[in-house]
Image: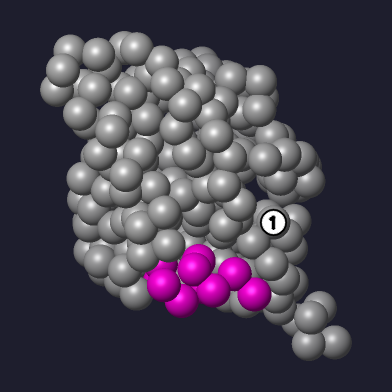
Amino acid sequence: MRALFRCIKVFLALAIFLVALSPPGAGAAEKIGVLMLHGKAHGNKSIYHLSGELESAGFLVEMPSSTPWSPNRIYDRTYLETLKELDAAVDKLKAAGATRVVVGGHSIGANVALGYAANRKGLGGLIVLGAGHFISGNFMGKKLGKHVARAKKMIAAGKGKKEADFDDINQRKSTSREMTAEIYQSWFDPEGPANMRNNAASLPGELPVLWVAGKEDKVASKVLKRLAYDKMVGNPKNRFVIINGSHKDTADN
């Protein structure tokens, strides 16, 4: 019964959050579009059910299946180039009739959604689900520090577009990936554009944010609450919700 209550609570929070984005007096013509971004390991599987529920509820949903962090492409663009690529998805929602666009994502998709919202004006809201790719945290920062230093050294030597093997970490598991030093630095340098703490602090004060974390996902529910969510300018519509489940279950739950 407690688990059911939590599910109802978070669904109501999401519904209230999205409906509240409509301006006072908005008529039936008001359409909210939602750009939903998947996690890294399983592509759209991580957000498929949630996106379907949003569509059933009447929202316009754009769910790109191929992104610069999806399994078929994995880091083929810099972080800022990735944000430019997402502009096309937002434009597609507007062309379909969206009068207001919310951007959201799960895991590394939540990181990118946060970065997008910090670098774009005029969005209707932000949804962060089980935020991942916390490069400024102690674990990833220490594990990947030497790789970031090597990438920066290559860039300084004029070899930024040369490919090399660099380490990536997903849910504490290390993987070697081949990409250019330029791309690696943009995604993994704590001083670069993918830093969630900096992006959260740079969000427009009027932007409403729904931030959801699984209870078993300690980084998302505790560390990022303190180091990212709490750094945002306080919008009265902001909500931080902890639900049952692990990191990978956040969007489904």
- Provide residue 247's location: percent of width, then percent of height: 64, 61
User: 67 above or below 43?
Assistant: above
Q: Is residue 200 visible?
A: no
Q: Residue 188 location, x and y as percent? A: 36, 41
Helix, strand or loop: magenta stretch: helix
Q: Which residue is mark 1?
A: 248
Residue type at the position of mark 1: Lys
Vertical arrangement, residue 229 with respect to residue 1, above or below: above
Q: What residue sits 22% from the left and 31% below the top?
A: 152
Q: Nearer the viewer, residue 203 or 141?
A: 141
Q: Is residue 102 above or below residue 252?
A: above
Residue at 52 percent of width and 18 percent of height:
92
- 235 vs 112, left or right, is left
The quarter of the picture where the N terminus appears is bottom right
* 52 displayed left or right of 251: right
Residue 5 in the image, given as x and y percentages of width and height:
75, 81
Numbered label tally: 1
Lateral position of residue 6 relative to residue 79, left or right: right
What is the span of residues highlighted in magenta in the rendered image?
216-225
Quarter of the C terminus within the rendering: bottom right
* The image quarter in which residue 4 lies: bottom right
Residue extending furthest toward the left: 156
Q: Position of residue 29 (x, y in %)?
A: 54, 33
- SS of the residue under disc 1: loop
Residue 221 highlighted magenta (yes or no): yes
Question: Is residue 7 covered in magenta?
Answer: no
